[in-house]
């Protein structure tokens, strides 16, 4: 079952795909939001760099984010690109997909418990909400406070449908904390370089702390060193937009201070929602860097023999 009313994606739309098969010309994928219809990524659209190993860029079973290049609705052909994906658009695409997947799970559950056709439920409830509120997920959240307003243009062919839906929304749609992260590089080669970077980061932390509400359940935004000059900003929040705005203010404060000190800042990844998988990858990277640092600090056996002599 597709998530959206349109049977095919639009050109330049970002989509989430799963790699099904890799052949001579490219990779065949299924579009997860569009009832798993088939699309193709030609090898020339995998990377901007020279391809030395396809397996390092794409693997069967892996989920990827692509942008739509061409759609032939008559033949059902969809051409996609991975290399033309703008890193800044990855976060919004992931958010849209996760929200749509959540809506789909809710609609599928309602179809099962009320013994109704899933596509018809989408036509009666979910797709009208996408049109009116931009996303059915946002409408479902609003429905917890204003159900009559949200569902006024929806059709409920069975009396129990709305009741079951509201019960499920109460259970699933209450605000869940999400993790936000930004990746920045901060450098300063002036004589006071290290102190300048520390001051800049402290300015950023102070700016963000001032904006976070005292009664908020959000965790303080932390700035952690990964490996010079790379730092990550991390927080857990119940309000994604507010959290991203606060992080942006923190980055701006760091920028203002470090530029005054003749340093520089590069935003590797803008503030965005990260998954548990991203979090795990970050932890693995930090552990690996710590291990390398310990290896560099420990003398090898030959050095120990020399020292002992």
Image (spheres, helix red, strand yellow):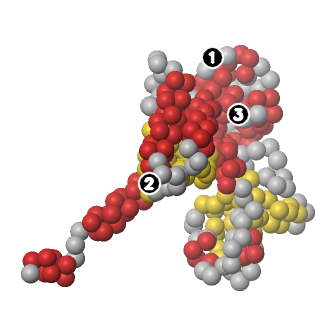
Q: Residues within 10 Å of mark 2 (few under 14, many from 20)?
A: some
Q: Nearer the viewer, residue 117 or 70?
A: 70
Considering only order in the chain, which callout, 3 or 1, is on the residue closer to the N terminus?
A: 3
Which numbered tag is attached to residue 136?
A: 3
Mark 1 to mark 3 CA distance (whole Å): 15 Å
- Residue assigned mark 1: 145
Considering only order in the chain, which callout, 2 or 1, is on the residue closer to the N terminus?
A: 1
Vertically, is 183 above or below 202?
A: below
Q: Secondary structure beneath disc 3? A: helix
Q: Give coordinates of residue 160: x percent, y percent.
A: 63, 24
Q: Secondary structure beneath disc 2? A: strand
Which numbered tag is attached to residue 291?
A: none
Answer whether labels 2 and 3 touch (C-beta < 8 Å): no
Instruction: Identify the residue at the far front of this view.
Output: 191
The residue located at (70%, 41%) in the rendering is 117
The residue located at (38%, 61%) in the rendering is 289
Q: Give coordinates of residue 79: x percent, y percent.
A: 80, 66
Instruction: Give the quadrant of the C terminus.
Output: bottom left
In front: mark 1 or mark 2? Answer: 2
Residue 288 in sight in this render: yes
The residue located at (80%, 29%) in the rendering is 132
Q: Residues within 10 Å of mark 1 (few under 14, many from 20)?
A: few
- Residue assigned mark 2: 226
Q: Nearer the viewer, residue 178 or 250?
A: 250
Considering only order in the chain, which callout, 3 or 2, is on the residue closer to the N terminus?
A: 3
């Amino acid at each position: 079952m597709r998530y959206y009313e349109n049977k095919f994606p639009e050109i330049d739309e970002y989509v989430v795909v799963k790699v099904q098969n890799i052949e001579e010309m490219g990779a065949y994928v299924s579009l997860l939001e569009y009832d798993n219809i088939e699309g193709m990524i030609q090898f020339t659209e995998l990377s901007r760099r020279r391809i030395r190993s396809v397996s390092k860029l794409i693997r069967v079973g892996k989920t990827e984010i692509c942008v739509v290049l061409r759609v032939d609705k008559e033949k059902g052909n969809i051409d996609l690109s991975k290399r033309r994906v703008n890193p800044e658009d990855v976060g919004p695409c992931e958010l849209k997909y996760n929200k749509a997947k959540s809506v789909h799970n809710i609609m599928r559950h309602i179809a099962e418990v009320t013994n109704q056709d899933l596509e018809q439920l989408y036509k009666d409830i979910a797709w009208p909400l996408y049109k009116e509120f931009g996303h059915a997920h946002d409408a479902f959240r609003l429905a917890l406070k204003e159900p009559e307003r949200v569902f006024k243009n929806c059709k409920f062919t069975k009396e129990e449908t709305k009741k079951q839906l509201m019960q499920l929304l109460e259970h699933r749609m209450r605000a869940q904390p999400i993790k936000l992260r930004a990746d920045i590089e901060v450098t300063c080669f002036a004589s006071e370089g290290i102190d300048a970077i520390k001051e800049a980061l402290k300015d950023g932390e102070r700016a963000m702390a001032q904006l976070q509400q005292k009664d908020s359940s959000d965790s303080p935004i932390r700035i952690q060193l990964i490996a010079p000059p790379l730092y990550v900003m991390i927080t857990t929040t119940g309000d994604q937009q507010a959290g991203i705005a606060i992080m942006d203010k923190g980055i701006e404060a760091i920028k203002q201070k470090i530029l005054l000190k003749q340093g520089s800042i590069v935003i590797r990844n803008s503030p965005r929602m990260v998954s548990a998988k991203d979090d795990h990858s970050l932890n693995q990277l930090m552990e690996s860097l710590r291990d390398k640092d310990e290896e560099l600090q420990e003398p090898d056996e030959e050095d120990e023999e020399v020292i002992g002599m």
